[in-house]
Amino acid sequence: MKKKKLIVKAPLLSRSGYGEQARIAIRALRTRPDLFDIYLLNISWGGTGCVSDYTPEIQWIHDKLLQTVQYAQGGGQFDVSLQITIPNEFEKIAPVDIGYTAGIETTMVAGDWIHKCNEIVDRIITISEHSKKVFEATSYHIKNENTGEETKDFKLLKPVQVVNYPAYEYESAPAGLDIPFETHKNFLCISQWGIRKNLENTIKWFVEEFRDDEDVGLVLKTNVMSDCTIDREMTTERLQHLLDTWCGERKCKIYLLHGELTTEELTWLYQHPSMKAMINLAHGEGYGLPLFEAAYNGLPLVTVTWSGQMDFICKTNKKGKKVPLVSRVDYDIAPVQEAAIWDGVIVKDAKWAYARESSYKRALRDILTKEKHFKNQAAILRHHIKKTFSEEAIYRQFVEAVYGEPIIDINIDDLPKISIITSVFDAEEHIEQLMEDVTRQTIFKEKCEWVILNANGPNNNFEEEVIMKYVEKYPDNIVYKRLDEDPGIYATWNMAIKMATGEYITNVNCDDRRAPWAFESQAKCLTGNPDADLVYNDSYMVNEANQMWEDVNPDNRRYNFDEFSKEAMLRGNLPHNNPMWRKDLHEQHGYFNAEYRSASDWDFWLKCSFAGSKFQKLGEVLGVYYFNPKGMSTNPENFEWKQKEEKEIFKKYFAKLRESKATAPEGNLVL
């Protein structure tokens, strides 16, 4: 598989949720140096501070930042960008741009986010099913102020993939923290002090519940913006004001922790014998990393059963139902507070969860009165998380999401035979380079058979002379036949397919080119994805003949095809000029319709799609499509009959699409 130059734009050194998200991403990507050449671009994150612990990981980040500057100053280009931030800040950086965002903690994303995602990035990675569902469910009715044009269903068009965080194994700090615990029944809360986190109610209701219990304590790890001394003073004053104003006299204790803690110190907190539960009463979470960390350390949880944490606080029971293994806090979904509205991020029509006071107090009491029960639940949840969210599994998911295709550890020996089919007609200008381009493929000698059918007239022998030189060089790979007449490109393809002896088929047009590893990547993808019947990829578009793949500027125009669906297939021919497919598609669905002169491949792929075949898109640019002014499908002189063909095909399958939607059972997704 091709190694890609990847630029990661993120708050890599920030003491924030996005900062930790960025560092988790880097750890995953660094597990596959064979796939990624990593470059870094650091950005700030609000007023948050920077990490101060100078670990080998932070040293590596600093070294990479310097290397990136030097590479960029030398004119270096990138294949892919991974932008770890909110969508407002997405920008075009590379031929493939990926947005990696925590999403939003409410019930809808801002219209600006949808616009940015649709216009800028190729796909989106997010951290929870909640975030994905909100992205996909949000829809707006908008009006263009300049044209007056209205869009009644303005929504996200780009694919969203969920990759959760991994569960780590950390040692507890031997010396622990210098906390003068006077209590033996302690609860932990880790949260930045802001309106979404609902800290005021978390603290106030806690004190009201345990006001008279001198053996209960709340360990509160928080800050307002950063970890500096001034912020510590602000946080202390805010907490004291809350306690003095709302809480009155009390016997229970509040322990304030401020400043950066190492992972070992946090582990010590999670595992402290006096710690009874972790509290999270936030209105919503993109994921809830401290809650996740507490859970995989075996600490019982007190939280609402809504938003991002649902990905990890639940375990499926024998009936297939997801059951939260926490002390549940009931909640109501209601509009966000006016003070929470954030232009371009949290919109006024959004809603989130409001914990119910009585339910929260009951959940706290249950932790103490049913301690054995919740400890057992926490142990079960810990085991489930360790098994489901292992570093190896999550890192692999993330690497595949960034790379854009399944990471298939398949040896060349495991690949079946591949039959390449080519129809040669009036290709004098392209034939020499065509023969070179195909025979240099990484698996050509070991795995490929090339069926070449020459449809030229009897007086045109130039192409044959060139082909025969390569037949002599590769007698075990090239099958050559001169036809008596030209039956048309699709009839020629059908003849070649019937002659082919490989399990996989790919067509090579005389004027198009491939990346040297294209056949290998496509064949490995098909082999590793038994449910896929065809693989396709993006291609560069060039106006100059005979440009090899490596000679095309990475910033060149390209066909940026959608992910596979029936709807996307109707919008355009996704496989286009260089797919690879299983030969048994023809046993199931017949051959290309030779009555069409230009669009028979689109017709056949639609036929397969509507019959249930699955196509897989590869996440790299593997083809070069020459916009040949003399080509069958690109010659302006052919547009009239070409459009007639395409219209006929579209109408036929659009009718099938409407029929499938009309007969679908209510509530089921057909497309």
Image (tube, rainbow, N blue to C red):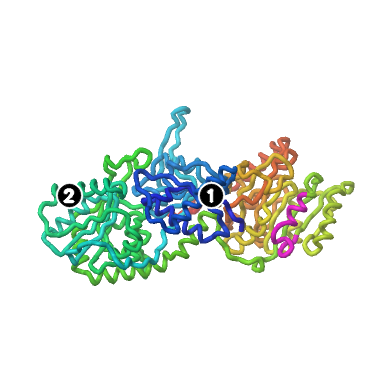
The numbered disc on residue 337 is none
State which region is magenta.
Answer: 433-449
Query: Vertically, is 110 above or below 582?
Result: above
Say whether residue 444 is magenta: yes
Q: Main SS of the magenta segment?
A: helix
Question: Which numbered disc covers residue 240?
Answer: 2
Of tags 1 and 2, the one toward the viewer is 1
User: Mark 2 Cα within 10 Å, few/some/many (few <14, many 20+)?
Assistant: few
Does 520 sit left or right of 18 as displayed? Answer: right
Q: Position of residue 25 (x, y in %)?
A: 46, 55
Indicate the position of residue 354 as horizontal and vertical percent values: 25, 50
Residue 67's disc is 1
The reply to whether residue 606 is in sight is no
Q: Earlier in the sequence, mark 1 or mark 2?
A: 1
- The amino acid beneath tag 2 is Gln
For image coordinates 21% across by 69% down, the residue present is 370
Tell me if residue 222 comes above or below residue 345 in the rendering: below
Asked whether 55 or 217 is in front, the reply is 55
